[in-house]
Image (tube, helix red, strand yellow):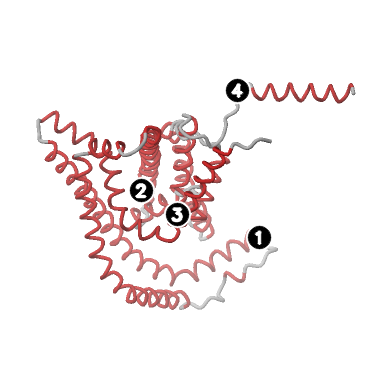
């Protein structure tokens, strides 16, 4: 068999560069990320701020630099204000929830005794004494005191790191804001300069990758943020109607679980409803199950319309991307790998890259016909 030395040499060179890139990322990836991350974030944010800044410039005849600075500062002011209000509200509810958990721990033995009596009444042949009075009344308060001491000790050891982290964070945010202003003001010129340094084939490749990246990221995260906002609103309204304390904090936690792939609101609401039923709170258990049914029904109706058909990943491929991303990069990988898989699929469908071949529509019929001919040939011979 003839071997194409040119193609083989090209493949080996690409493989060598890929291996070198993997080595550099594994060895110096954290350091490089710390250097380039503010500029990468600024470039991504500037892509979305450029259209409103351009509209402001054309509509009100404002100088381009001034409009970009105004839009950028307005965006970051709104973002930081939202984060501050959110964290302040969560912090106040967490402080209140700590006292609630302590009080609940004191009452938990009586709750478990009620659960034991409830289960023994309905399942008389089973033994549930492990739920009864074997637990000392002061067990949970002591456990909470120990946990609080451990947390205090951890925070005390963490304070020196925080003292060094705060100045770095301030510098990081300042560089990100300033870089966003520069990127938003001269986005087209910067893009032209970078593309001018590349050969023609690389220009096409980079341009298409950039289009697919921003299109996929904006649609993917925009869709899931919309779904998360709908779920959070449903949870908050439901908890407030039930008179649930710390409704904002619990809604935020359940929404965070619901966003994660392979999980959902039922991971929290269904066990919670089961515990409430065992404790005799049947009305609350029914309310939690009804809330879960409403969230599921709304999600089944809204998700296809919000996500649309832009994802287009085969379910097995999506499952592999989620699993591999989670194993390699934790929670961030659960979101990064599916997005990367969507981008690669779109690039392959547009023949920008060639990772795999899609069979033609009638290939299944041709394969079936060939198999039938082969079977007849074997039978006749």
Q: Is residue 41 above or below residue 102?
A: above
Whether residue 17 is visible, yes or no, is yes
Which marked residue is nearer to the observer: mark 3 or mark 1?
3
* Sequence-first disc among 3 and 1: 1
Whether residue 286 is visible, yes or no, is no
Q: Which mark is residue 9?
A: none
* Sequence-first disc among 1 and 2: 1
- Give the secondary structure at mark 3: helix
Residue 64 lies, in percent from the top left, at 14, 36
| Distance between the alpha carbons at the discs numbered 3 and 2 | 25 Å
- Give the secondary structure at mark 4: loop
Badges 3 and 2: C-beta atoms under 8 Å apart?
no
Q: Is residue 111 above or below residue 343?
A: below
* Sequence-first disc among 1 and 4: 1
- Residue occupied by mark 2: 236
| Distance between the alpha carbons at the discs numbered 4 and 2 | 48 Å
* Sequence-first disc among 3 and 2: 2
Which marked residue is nearer to the observer: mark 1 or mark 4?
4
Residue 201 lies, in percent from the top left, at 40, 33
Residue placed most toward the observer, 5 or 113: 5
């Amino acid at each position: 068999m003839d071997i194409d030395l040119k193609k083989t040499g090209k493949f080996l060179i690409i493989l060598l560069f890929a291996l070198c890139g993997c080595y550099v990322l594994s060895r110096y990836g954290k350091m490089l990320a710390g250097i380039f991350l503010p500029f990468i974030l600024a470039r991504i944010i500037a892509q979305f701020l450029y259209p409103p800044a351009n509209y402001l410039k054309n509509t009100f005849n404002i100088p381009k630099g001034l409009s970009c600075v105004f839009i950028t500062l307005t965006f970051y002011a709104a973002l930081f204000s939202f984060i501050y209000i959110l964290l302040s509200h969560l912090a106040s509810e967490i402080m209140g929830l700590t006292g609630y958990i302590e009080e609940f721990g004191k009452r938990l033995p009586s709750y478990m005794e009620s659960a034991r009596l409830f289960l023994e009444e309905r399942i008389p042949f089973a033994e549930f004494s492990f739920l009864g009075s074997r637990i000392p009344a002061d067990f949970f308060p002591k456990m909470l005191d120990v946990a609080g001491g451990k947390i205090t000790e951890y925070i005390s050891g963490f304070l020196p790191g925080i003292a060094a982290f705060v100045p770095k964070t301030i510098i990081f945010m300042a560089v990100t804001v300033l870089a966003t202003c520069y990127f938003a003001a001269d986005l087209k010129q910067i893009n032209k300069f970078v593309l001018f340094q590349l050969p023609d084939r690389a220009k096409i490749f980079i341009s298409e990758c950039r289009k697919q990246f921003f299109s996929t990221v904006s649609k993917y995260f925009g869709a899931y943020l919309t779904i998360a906002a709908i779920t959070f609103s449903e949870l908050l309204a439901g908890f407030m109607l039930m008179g649930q304390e710390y409704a904002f904090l619990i809604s935020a936690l359940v929404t965070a679980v619901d966003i994660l792939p392979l999980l959902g609101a039922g991971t929290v609401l269904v066990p919670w409803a089961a515990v409430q039923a065992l404790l005799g709170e049947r009305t609350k258990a029914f309310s939690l199950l009804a809330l879960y049914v409403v969230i599921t029904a709304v999600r089944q109706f809204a998700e296809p319309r919000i996500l649309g058909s832009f994802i287009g990943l085969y379910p097995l491929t999506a499952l592999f991307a989620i699993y591999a991303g989670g194993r390699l990069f934790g929670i961030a990988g659960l979101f990064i790998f599916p997005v990367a898989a969507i981008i690669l699929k779109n690039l392959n469908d547009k023949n920008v890259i060639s990772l795999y071949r899609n069979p033609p529509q009638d290939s299944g019929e041709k394969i079936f016909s060939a198999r039938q001919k082969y079977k007849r040939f074997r039978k006749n011979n």
